[in-house]
Amino acid sequence: MNTKLTTLLAIATIIGSLSPVDGDKYQNLRGKDTLSELVEEESAGSSAEWHQHNHARRRGSFRAVWYKPHFQCGYSAPANFVNNEMKRYHADFIGVSEYKSKGRINDRSYGYGNIHSQCGPSVIDLYYDDMNWSKVHELGGNRCTYSHSEKNKYGEKSVGGRPWAAGLFKNKSSHNEVCVVVAEVPHAVRHHKLDRTCTHNRHEISDCERNKDGTSKILGTSELVRGVERVCGDTPVVFMADSNIQSPSISTSSMFMSSHGHHNPLADLSDHSTPYTCCNTRSHQKSTQYAMDRIAATNGKLKVETLEGGSKTKGGTVHFPGQQGYICKTEEEHAPLLARISFAGKDTQLSDYSTELVEEESGGTEWPLVPTSHFFTHGKGHEKKPQGDWYYPHHNGEMVVHMSRPPHAKCTLTGGSGPYNFGEGHLHKDGHYCKNTKCWVFPVCSPIHGHGKGNTGTCTWGHGQHQDCHVLIMQTPGHTYYHKTLQKELSKTDWKPYK
């Protein structure tokens, strides 16, 4: 096979295997303008890296990402980065701070919810995987870290206009709960000298001006601590923030204190490490001088298994899996961080990966599964065969019904244990195939033990579903079937990898 043909097939595979939650045009999948850029980006995150993430998640850890592009970045690169985390790696939680640009983060298309907060012109967003986590409670909207009494006493300049947001989440499979907090923490200032910083080393922080409640050594954080206590309670916390702490020797927990007879959950945070992440600067200045960005978790209840991103050395080159150097490459940008976090002392599997997996990933999981029955290969009666959302050149322009697999979906079925019981159809809309056409999404029900009898399932999209396994069928002229008929025929057919 010549090089040109190989490239075309690679492009077709990437384009064709979109799942129904993708919802974007091929060429705009990552905010890229050309297919060559799309292929290059898709290959940037290696298959080995994807499998490493998948196996880690099945062992019970979840993926948390923090990134602060800063206002100076007006390009689409940060949106492309976040979209890649959502689509390719299914990150559980993503915190994004101070990003306003023309780049679009496709959270709804990829099945994510969002908690947005703003303090003055500063904004912050917490994205969460809505297919795997249920939101129990949230704090967002117009929300600043300082209390009104702090602002009135010290002035807005001293307390800073910093946003924060939080959400309490329950995993849909394991039912474990976690409280995720994203924040912009004000710059710490020296006691009685509010124009000087005090975080050059771990000894200096004792000289910092406390907040009004006495719950933090950082002025302007009283409302942050109060809010975290309200929304999180005793639930373990994941804290992702630009701490504005300069020295890596100052731990995240040392910023906070418990006092006045009440417990401050942020005082129990534990770091894995504190790499240098700030900031990208002009060429004649030194970059990456401060360890400001943090991902920390409640000690004894959660464990940060790994932390990647930033630089281990002051002034060094920042790294992120699949990425070297800053992403936007504009002034004041912070390097992103990636943490894998587990529930301490619990050997539990999270999300729908934990649902009785009976088939493992294989080396050929790039190709989707296709149905083999006469109904899907030739149709029934006067109607043509059902149409899916996979365009493949070998099919002369036909839209093929298929079941996406890694890296385009979480589904690891190989077809060997089919037929599969499919659940109730879910009407689906997106910005491309299903914009002006009625589409049905049918999930594979879990557990898959007992399948093969041709029975329809009772699961629904996101509830009782096996992993992310599903099929999308479009109702277009000449290809229209009653949704119950489609569910029945899906539950009767065998499946095989296309290649």
Image: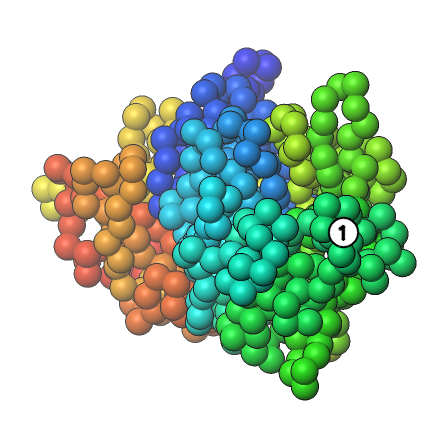
Q: In this view, does 481 lie to the left or right of 371?
A: left
Percent x, y of residue 148: 50, 62
Q: In this view, does 168 lie to the left or right of 390?
A: right
Q: Using a 10 Å C-alpha cutoff, classify the residue at mark 1 as few (fewer than 14 neighbours), some (14 to 19) or many (20 or more).
A: few
Q: Which colour scheme is used?
A: rainbow
Closer to the camera, 204 or 427?
204
Q: Total marks drawn?
A: 1
Q: Residue at image x 43%, y 46%?
A: 107
Answer yes or no: is residue 430 visible: yes
Q: Mark 1 points at which residue?
A: 193
Closer to the camera, 166 or 57?
166
Q: Residue at image x 39%, y 63%?
A: 462
Percent x, y of residue 382: 10, 42
Closer to the camera, 170 or 357?
170
Res. 57 image quadrant: bottom right
Q: Residue at image x 68%, y 86%?
A: 261
Q: In this view, does 434 lie to the left or right of 185?
A: left
Percent x, y of residue 58: 63, 63
Quadrant (top left, top right, bottom left, bottom right) of the N terminus: top right
Res. 399 image quadrant: top left
Res. 4 image quadrant: top right
Q: Residue furthest left?
A: 382
**Picture layout, residue 129 above or below residue 77:** below
Q: Label 1 amino acid? A: Lys
**Picture layout, residue 415 above or below residue 12:** below
